[in-house]
Image (tube, rainbow, N blue to C red):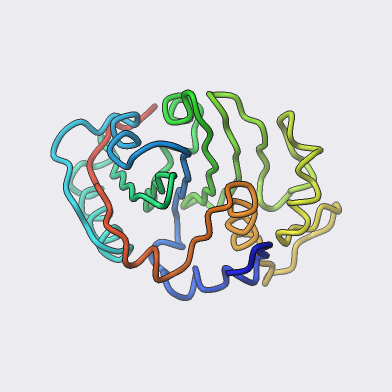
Amino acid sequence: MTTSPTAHDYTWFRERFPDLAEAYCVTLVEGLSPREALLRLGVNSEIRVLWGVRALCEAAFGDWELWDGVRAFVSAAAVGNWALVIEPNGFLAAVEQGQEKLSRGTRQITCFKGVSGNEHFSWVEDGEALLEFDLLTPGERFGREADKAAGQIRAAGFDLRDVEEPDDALYEEAAFALAERLTGVPLDADLLDGASYLCGMAPELP
């Protein structure tokens, strides 16, 4: 992984993890342990350990059928001084209620893709959204870091002009590159698939 990552450094994501790439919420939270991250999102019992992304996807889809949307699958692993929170087909860390809990006293960076196709990037500190944008329209950004971050957003691989993205645009990959640029935390396929994740079920948010 380069020290100044671009979208091309993350092309492995869709190739290596096609099930997760269908819909996901991937979040980095500074200074929290995996257990602390789960507790903040409401996981307080039946915490178990799973290894690798494939196991997460199988468990998440199985639990979704079991709970029928009443509870949500959440997993977290330690990556340096950060908690890596992965929600296959989830969204708790991407919505305001979840962000207020997870980012309390710290910061979180989230890459989100929903089953309906909506995709966005967010940088939240202590409940305040410093940067938010839809991956398809990065020129329309919100938050007090929106202007300052323009150079990093462009360098990660986004086109900030008001133009239609080509079908093969690497905007999801650019979001992961931007997350690395803002956190200094590189993610790679072997790390994701070799990590030990604490997992549990959280109450579904409205």
Percent x, y of residue 187? 49, 61
Horizontal side, residue 72 vs residue 62: left or right: right
Horizontal side, residue 204 vs residue 82: left or right: left
Q: Is residue 195 above or below residue 206?
A: below
Q: Is residue 97 above or below residue 133?
A: above
Foreground residue among 30 and 21: 30
Q: Is residue 15 above or below residue 58?
A: below
Foreground residue among 125 and 74: 125
Percent x, y of residue 183? 58, 47
Horizontal side, residue 174 vs residue 74: left or right: right
Pick the quarter of the image with the C terminus. Answer: top left
Q: Residue at x 46, y 52 (%)?
A: 115
Foreground residue among 174 and 107: 107
Q: Quadrant of residue 204?
A: top left
Q: Quadrant of residue 16?
A: bottom left
Pick the quarter of the image with the N terminus. Answer: bottom right
Q: Residue at x 49, y 33 (%)?
A: 95
Percent x, y of residue 136? 69, 53
Q: Is residue 168 above or below residue 186?
A: below
Q: Residue at x 25, y 33 (%)?
A: 43
Q: How many marks?
A: 0
Foreground residue among 142 and 106: 106
Percent x, y of residue 103? 48, 29
